[in-house]
């Protein structure tokens, strides 16, 4: 019997449900549109002892093989402005809304805060998972709170931005992937917050313009154009964006690497340095590399691509060799950014 109106479908292909498009099947699949159907789906899986995988747009997961459990796609929609107060306004957005459309909705309404995060694929509900970031801006700068279904407590809760423990491409949700399902987020946006044009690509883009008159919509348009020139569109060349995180290392390690490799690309903070993982991989000679169905993008070495007809194990094998090469040459550990399924393949290639 199916729990409270939900009807999971058996043996569903997930190839079209993620941006890497590797062959993978879900033993069971269901789409939920509210908290009641979510609860019913979780109960249904618990009753059968099945693991659960919560899926948004599938742009930050590596579905490298079959998942022997219930895949729940969160389709909670809706956007609602509240507490508009002169310069600032709060916006509540359902987890199933498209992220990029939400960014464009806010900039067209004249609000600033999300413009640098334009064109990031995926859903609103996944944005807090790794505290999405681009061009010097992270979700955490505008996020007010997150409404979640807490599987441990068995109730809906609202977590403040502080309780989300946001960090560089990290959060409490990423560290406890089984515990929370995100239902909605609330953002606080401003009409007058300063625009962030610090990244080189944006500086170059606006080099001949008077930046004092720029709107958030202008910046979003620039981000879209820059991204389209540099990053592969997953609809044409399947990928998951950055395959590895940029490693953050102690200053002492950065200084000894810089002495050995003067060309090292890194961004130095007060007590640590962020190394450009793309530069490390490129320097090992992998940029543009291809072996049959998988490879490394020719304009950004941090992006691994699937040329079609490949298998998850091929891609993970390539990623493992890149990781080992970087470790052997620079003594730096690369950590995979997206989550890998199934667990057996993650372990086979020693991805933690
Ligand atoms: P999914 O891949 O479906 O899920 C990602 C993780 O979140 C999984 O662990 C999943 O279980 C979990 N999850 C999803 N929804 C929920 C929910 N409602 N509740 C609880 N857990 C959930 N990322 C950046 O940070 N910055 C970038 O600039 C960027 N650029 C990218 C460019 C390209 C071309 C691609 C392909 C990816 C890029 N990404 C970037 C990565 C990715 O788009 C983001 O991480 C995005 O937020 C993932 O959204 P999604 O809905 O596709 O998540
Ligand atoms: P880029 O601008 O060529 O920069 C290369 C790397 O250097 C980036 O990873 C970026 O770190 C870092 N960097 C550049 N300028 C910096 C500065 N002024 N201060 C601190 N760090 C700086 O990168 P790109 O590949 O074209 O991507 C553009 C932006 O989109 C980046 O912010 C990147 O993170 C984001 N992006 C993310 C993904 C993903 O899947 N996570 C995929 C594509 C693009 P940060 O990554 O920390 O910004």
Image (tube, rainbow, N blue to C red):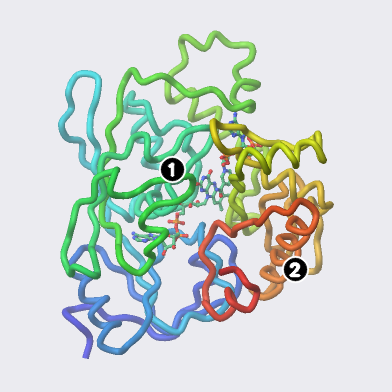
Label 1 near ligand 1 (CB < 8 Å): no
Mark 1 crowdedness (10 Å alpha carbons): few <14, some 14-19, many ≥20: some
**Quarter holding residue 309:** bottom right
In the rendered view, does 160 fall on the left or right side of 12? left
Mark 2 crowdedness (10 Å alpha carbons): few <14, some 14-19, many ≥20: some
Residue 14, x across and y down, in percent: 50, 73
In the rendered view, does 334 fall on the left or right side of 147? right
User: Looking at this view, is 225 or 40 the one in front?
Assistant: 40
- The C terminus lies in quadrant: bottom right
272 relative to 33, above or below: above
User: Looking at this view, is 193 or 326 the one in front?
Assistant: 326
Please tell me the numbered disc located at residue 293.
2
144 relative to 179, above or below: above
The residues bearing labels 2 and 1 have C-alpha atoms spaced at a distance of 29 Å
234 relative to 117, above or below: below
Residue at image coords 25%, 87%: 47
Residue 97, x across and y down, in percent: 34, 51
Residue at image coords 30%, 63%: 180
Which residue is tagged 1?
A: 100
Quadrant field for ligand 2:
top right
**Quarter holding residue 157:** bottom left
Residue at image coords 36%, 20%: 193
């Amino acid at each position: 019997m199916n729990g409270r109106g939900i009807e999971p479908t058996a043996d569903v292909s997930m190839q079209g449900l993620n941006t890497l498009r590797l062959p993978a099947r879900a033993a069971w699949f269901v789409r939920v549109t509210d908290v009641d159907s979510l609860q019913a789906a979780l109960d249904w899986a618990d009753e059968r002892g099945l693991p659960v995988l919560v899926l948004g747009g599938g742009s930050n997961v590596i579905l490298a093989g079959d998942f022997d459990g219930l895949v729940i796609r969160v389709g909670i929609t809706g956007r609602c402005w509240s507490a508009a107060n002169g310069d600032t306004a709060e916006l509540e957005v359902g987890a199933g809304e498209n992220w990029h459309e939400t960014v464009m909705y806010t900039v067209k309404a004249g609000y600033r805060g999300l413009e640098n995060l334009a064109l990031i694929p995926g859903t609103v509900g996944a944005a807090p998972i790794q505290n999405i970031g681009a061009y010097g801006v992270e979700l955490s700068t505008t996020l007010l709170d997150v409404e979640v279904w807490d599987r441990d407590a068995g109730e809906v809760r609202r977590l403040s931005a502080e309780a989300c423990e946001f960090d560089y491409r990290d959060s409490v949700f990423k560290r406890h992937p089984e515990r929370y399902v995100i239902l909605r987020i609330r953002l606080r946006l401003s009409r007058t917050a300063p625009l962030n044009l610090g990244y080189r690509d944006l500086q170059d883009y606006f080099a001949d313009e008077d930046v004092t008159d720029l709107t958030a919509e202008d910046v979003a348009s620039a981000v879209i154009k820059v991204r389209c020139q540099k990053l592969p569109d997953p609809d044409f060349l399947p990928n998951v964006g950055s395959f590895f995180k940029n490693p953050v290392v102690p200053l002492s390690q950065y200084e000894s690497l810089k002495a050995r490799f003067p060309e090292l690309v890194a961004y130095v903070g007060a007590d640590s340095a962020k190394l450009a993982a793309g530069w490390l991989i490129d320097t090992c000679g992998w940029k543009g590399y291809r072996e049959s169905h998988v490879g490394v993008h020719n304009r950004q070495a941090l992006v691994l691509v699937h040329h079609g007809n490949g298998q998850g194990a091929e891609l993970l094998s390539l990623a493992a060799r890149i990781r080992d090469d970087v470790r052997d040459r620079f003594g730096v550990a690369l950590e995979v950014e997206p989550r890998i399924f199934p667990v057996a393949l993650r372990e086979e290639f020693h991805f933690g």
